[in-house]
Amino acid sequence: MKHRLTLFSDAVYAIIITLMVLDLRTPEIPGWDGWWHLLPRLGGYSATFVLLLVIWLHHHHVFCRVREINRAMFWFNGGALFFSSLLPWTLRSIVEHPHDPTAYIVYQIIAWNAMTGMTWFRLSASKIHGRDPGWKEWSRKRNRVAAIGTLQAAVFCALTFVYLPAAIAIYIAMLIFVIVSIDITASSGAMATEEAAERSSQP
């Protein structure tokens, strides 16, 4: 079940990124002016692309540590995929209405739910893997990151009505923080440990 769910999730994230690319358009006027006018759209695409990479990396990081999938984990994973699939739609709203605070707030709410879905996935997994070596310490670290992410989302929504560039700067800073907070080497180690356990259990 875990293997099939991993492959399915990877495919969904790949499709989401592909759908975003289809929204990119060539310049309507020739020359550098045409490309200049596309910079806001390209910036939104780049930020959302990085966000999806972060969500996928977090997804990969969590799945490397779990051995079993229960019903709650399955549906929370589905919820994370659902909200991730809405990101291209909310990005299109920002591109079409770049000065509308509501468009940015809806985007942030969708992004927060996409990340929080994996937080609930991890909390559900604790019922099965809570006694695994290193799980509690790792889970506490992820809880701190999730709490900071929730605070960032609230500040972002408030700032969009006050000073939009500051809200965007906080959003970008949070992306960088989440990227740095995910230890890829740790997830690789967890995967190696799991593979070794599987080999040792084979006759």
Image: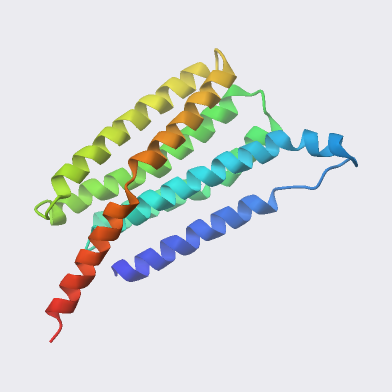
Q: Where does residue 171 sit, x and y in percent of width and height? A: 49, 29
> In the image shown, does 146 or 75 lie closer to the viewer?
146
- Outermost residue on the top side: it is 162
Quadrant that contains the N terminus: bottom left
In the rendered image, the residue lying farthest to the front is 185
Q: Is residue 44 shown left or right of residue 34?
A: left
Quarter holding the C terminus? Answer: bottom left
The color scheme shown is rainbow
Q: From the viewer's perspective, tell me whether residue 120 is left or right of residue 7.
A: left
The image position of residue 184, as x and y in percent, is 34, 52
In this view of the protein, which residue sits in the foreground, 157 or 146?
146
Please state if 200 lies on the left or on the right of 54 as rendered: left
Q: What x and y, as percent, mark residue 83?
A: 46, 46
Q: Looking at the image, is 142 positioned above or below residue 134?
A: above
Residue at 52 percent across and 32 percent down: it is: 106
View extreme (right): residue:
30
Q: Is residue 64 visible?
A: no
Residue occupying the point 16% across, 49% down: 135
Figure check: 125 above or below 181: below
Looking at this view, name the residue that lies furthest to the bottom.
203
Q: Is residue 60 visible?
A: yes
203 or 13, nearer to the observer: 203
Q: Residue at x 25, y 54 (%)?
A: 72
Residue found at x 59% / y 46%:
88
Residue 189, horizontal then vertical, whole percent: 25, 59
Q: How many circles with numbers are drawn on the protein?
A: 0
